[in-house]
Amino acid sequence: MSRSERLLSLLQVLRNHRRPVSGQVLADEIGVSIRTLYRDIASLQAQGAAIEGEPGVGYVMKPGFMLPPLMFASEELDALVLGMRWVADRGDRTLANAALSTLAKISAVLPLELRRELQESALLVGAGHKTSSHSIAPDLLRVAIREERKLQITYGDASGAVSQRVVWPFALVYFDQSRVLMCWCELRGDLRNFRTDRIAEADLLEVRYPKHRQSLLRQWRRSEHAVNRLILPELGSDLG
């Protein structure tokens, strides 16, 4: 195990302990000597890790501390680069710009060796189908999901029939050729999926819907046709 991987493991172990834990316990969990453990903790503290404690008392990491990017393992950097490049190529403009900005921020704080590895990554995104044209900005849909607010939409199904709906959006699914908004539909009194390229108009209402989006997502996962609900829109079916 390299030193970087060892420090990353130490941070992960500390995050798993809500209360102060002795240095010997930490050393045993990671598989190092107590002297090495003390040196590693001092090194992490010098790099800004919010670790409190001292020998003989125990150590704890303050809640909310995020792992510094310089601690990423090679496989984690590969995953980040590939994921961000996919979003930059296939996402809408806002997400694409955010992906490129994220990569730039990570690159700026990496040590030279890892920065070069990130910038020279050979994991590329191949050419793919672009999503259909959309009348509604995906930013609006993401805001509705994040803030758990109702949407009033004008929706046209596969046959061309148009309806007015008030929905509770709780997830946005990205396919190669389409996006699907997962909602509770007040008109149907049930879970429904809506292809976003068929939403002609959408108004973000001030009122929040009465459930948490995670509750709705769990309800969808428990539903009998959860798999079909996710796959069918990709094949062109309309489930609204």
Image (cartoon, rainbow, N blue to C red):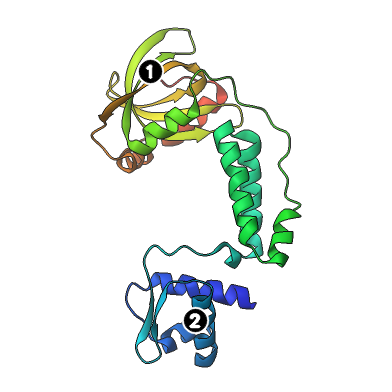
Residue 170 visible in the displayed image: no
Residue 190 vs 154, above or below: the answer is: below
Q: Residue at x 63, y 34 (%)?
A: 90
Residue 23 visible in the displayed image: yes
**How far is the residue under mark 1 from the one under mark 2?**
54 Å
Q: Is residue 172 left or right of 222 when viewed as pictured?
A: right
Count of residue discs: 2
Residue 152 found in image quarter = top left
As helix, strand or loop, the secondary structure at mark 2 comes to helix
Q: Residue 81: percent from the left, percent from the top?
A: 65, 51
Q: Which residue is mark 1?
A: 153
Quick one: quadrant of the N terminus? bottom right
Q: Is residue 51 left or right of 43 when viewed as pictured?
A: left
Give me the disc on residue 41: 2
Residue 119 vs 112, above or below: the answer is: above
Residue 115 found in image quarter = bottom right
Residue 230 vs 156, above or below: the answer is: below
Q: Residue at x 63, y 50 (%)?
A: 103
Q: Is residue 45 left or right of 169 when viewed as pictured?
A: right
Q: Residue at x 61, y 31 (%)?
A: 176
- Label 1: few (<14), some (14–19) or many (≥20) C-alpha neighbours in 10 Å: some
The residue positioned farthest toward the left in the image shown: 210
As helix, strand or loop, the secondary structure at mark 1 comes to strand
Q: Residue 13: percent from the left, percent from the top?
A: 45, 74
Residue 58 vs 225, above or below: the answer is: below
Q: Residue at x 43, y 72 (%)?
A: 50
